[in-house]
Each structure stands twice: as C-alpha cells, then as structure tokens.
C-alpha cells in the first residue's frame, strides 16, 4: 500500500528520525569508559526510562495550550505538538502517544518556563515561546513552528489610531516581549504616543482588567487575542503588522534532546501537519 509522507509520520511518530538523531548524539561519548556518564546526562534516555515526556505548556491560550475545565484536559496546537515530540522520542505513533497520554503537562508562565528547563523539571517548553537572540544564549530552540504578530485589543470605538494610545494603560503579560514590541512599533511608525504598561500574571487577568476599565488596551500575539475577543472588542489598526513572533520549542542548552525536537518540527512543517493544525484550531 502506498503511503503519503503525512501518513508515514502519523503511523511512525517520526521514530526513524529520532533513532538517527539520538544515535548520532548519544554515540559521541567516546570509549567505554565514558558510557555511564553519557547515559546519565542524556535527556533522551531519561525520557525513555520514565516513559513520558515532561512538557511545559500554557493553560490559558485558546488554540495553543488551553486547559479545558469541562474535560480537565489540555488542548490546542502546542498540546498536539508535544505528543508528536513524545512519539518521536519514544518510538511510537502520534496516535499512540495521545491515546496512552505519554506527555505529562505542566502549565508555565513567562517567569517560570526558563527555570523549569534549567533545573530539569521539564524536558521541553512549548508555550508560545518567542525565539530571540538573547534567549538562544540560555536555551536551545527548534525551528519556528508558528509565526504570529502582536495586536492591541481595545473596546470598540474607544480609539481609532495608535496615536490615541498616548497616556493610556496597556495590559501585558509578565516577562513577555510585548511591551518592547509596542514601544518599538510606535517609534517606527512615527506615532507621538507614550502609553504606560501594566503587567499581569496571566491573560484572563488582562482581559478582566480591560472589561473593568482598569486598562485601556490588551496587547498580545494576535492568535492569543482572538480567544479573548467578543463583539465588544476590536483590534486597533489591524492593518499595522508589527512584532513578528516566532514560536519555537525550547530545550536545555546543549541537550541531546534538542536535535530530535528540531527534526520533529521540521518534518511536521514539511509535510503540512502544522498547517492543518493551524486550520483545525482556527488560529489567525
């Protein structure tokens, strides 16, 4: 029976790629005297030994990483992507990884995600984590699996131009790059506006502040904002695209897991799986 590339990935869970990648990485240890040390430092072997991937995800970003309170299950593109990584590492199919729940999810915030990787509590972070040159100094990142742009959500009719942001309060997430992106955009586009920024621990808190009138705008990646938009809100000047956000999966710096994660993302980009996920979850 002929099998498409996508079907092959679904059935095999990218296991073949993983064997090649992990073999190349783990096999670099040298002579027999180094084998014990290499095995103890191997993230791939640690995951295989426990039989589950430990992933940091968001719990409040609809379409990416969202904890559905009615089912108590995580759902979204990034959740599915974590199962693909687990399938690749553990040598099973994507469907089997989901069915057997071979990923242990932990919700993370911009402040906690880095430290949880550093202290080995998590194997990967797949949580709308924007790749930056500064972050690449501390962690490894996969090829970007999604590119988004920053948007500014306001109450309908409250403003008509970015210039109207002068003196206004913009709600942003703690530890995010959004504040810098908005500030840079205003300068680049020539708007004479100096807003202030208020940080919040999570996205629902920002939306609640906007609803209550405690902030004038909610700035975040557009796909995230879509999940918090009702018929009472709108994007401010949506024709202005700024602050491109390249999302990547983060792993510990120098980890032997990094190559496997990167190979997985590249294969899923090549075969169209990620494009289908974007459509499935209705992302902008």
Image (cartoon, helix red, strand yellow):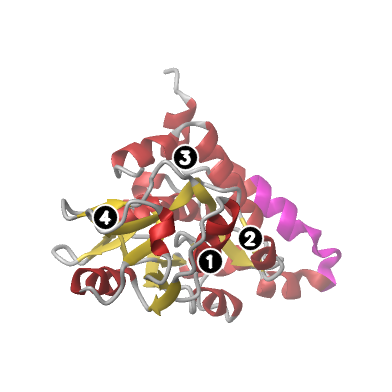
Give the residue pinned by disc 1: 177
Residue 17 in view here: yes
Looking at the figure, which quarter contains the N terminus? top left
In this rendering, the answer to whether 251 lies above or below 148 is below
Say if the magenta span includes residue 24.
yes
Residue 193 within the magenta-colored segment of the rendering: no
Residue that mark 3 sits on: 12
Q: Name the element at disc 4.
A: loop
Marked residue nearer the N-terminal end (4 or 2) = 2
Q: Distance between the Cα atoms at labels 1 and 4?
A: 20 Å
Q: CA distance from mark 1 to mark 2?
A: 9 Å
Q: Which mark is residue 132?
A: 2
Can you identify the residue that label 4 sits on?
Answer: 227
Q: Residue furthest front?
A: 192
Work out whether mark 1 precedes mark 3 in sequence or the reverse, and give the earlier one: 3
Structural distance between the alpha carbons of marks 4 and 3: 33 Å
Per the model, the C-alpha gap separating discs 2 and 3 is 32 Å
Q: Earlier in the sequence, mark 4 or mark 3?
A: 3
Single out the residue that lies furthest toward the right: 31
Stretch in magenta: 20-33
Q: Are marks 1 and 2 in contact (CB under 8 Å)?
A: yes
Question: Is 198 on the left or on the right of 69, as rendered?
Answer: right
Residue 22 coordinates in the image, percent (x, y): 66, 54
Say few, some or many: other residues with alpha carbon within 10 Å of mark 3 (under 14 / 14 to 19 / 20 or more).
some
Could you tell whether 62 is left or right of 109 in the image?
Answer: left
Task: Give the numbered dot on residue 56.
Answer: none
């Amino acid at each position: 029976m002929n099998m498409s590339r996508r079907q092959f990935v679904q059935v095999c869970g990218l296991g073949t790629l993983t064997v090649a990648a992990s073999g190349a990485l783990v096999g670099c240890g040298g002579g027999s005297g180094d084998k014990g040390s290499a095995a103890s430092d191997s993230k791939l072997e640690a995951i295989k030994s426990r039989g589950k991937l430990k992933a940091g995800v968001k719990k409040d970003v609809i379409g990416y990483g969202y904890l559905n309170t009615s089912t108590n299950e995580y759902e979204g593109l990034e959740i599915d992507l974590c199962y693909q990584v687990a399938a690749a590492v553990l040598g099973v199919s994507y469907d089997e990884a989901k069915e057997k729940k071979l990923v242990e999810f932990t919700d993370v915030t911009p402040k906690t995600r880095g430290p949880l990787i550093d202290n080995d509590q998590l194997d990967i972070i797949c949580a709308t984590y924007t790749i930056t040159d500064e972050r690449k100094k501390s962690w490894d990142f996969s090829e970007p699996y999604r590119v988004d742009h920053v948007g500014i959500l306001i109450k309908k009719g409250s403003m008509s131009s970015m210039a109207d942001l002068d003196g206004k309060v913009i709600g942003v997430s703690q530890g995010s790059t959004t504040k810098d992106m908005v500030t840079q955009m205003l300068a680049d586009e020539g708007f004479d506006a100096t807003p202030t920024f208020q940080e919040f621990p999570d996205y629902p808190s920002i939306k609640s502040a906007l609803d209550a009138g405690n902030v004038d705008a909610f700035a975040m990646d557009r796909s995230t904002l879509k999940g918090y938009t009702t018929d009472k809100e709108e994007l401010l000047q949506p024709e202005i695209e700024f602050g491109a956000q390249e999302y990547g999966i983060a792993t510990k710096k120098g980890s032997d897991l990094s190559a496997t994660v990167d190979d997985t993302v590249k294969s899923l980009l090549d075969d169209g799986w990620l494009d289908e996920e974007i459509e499935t979850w209705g992302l902008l």
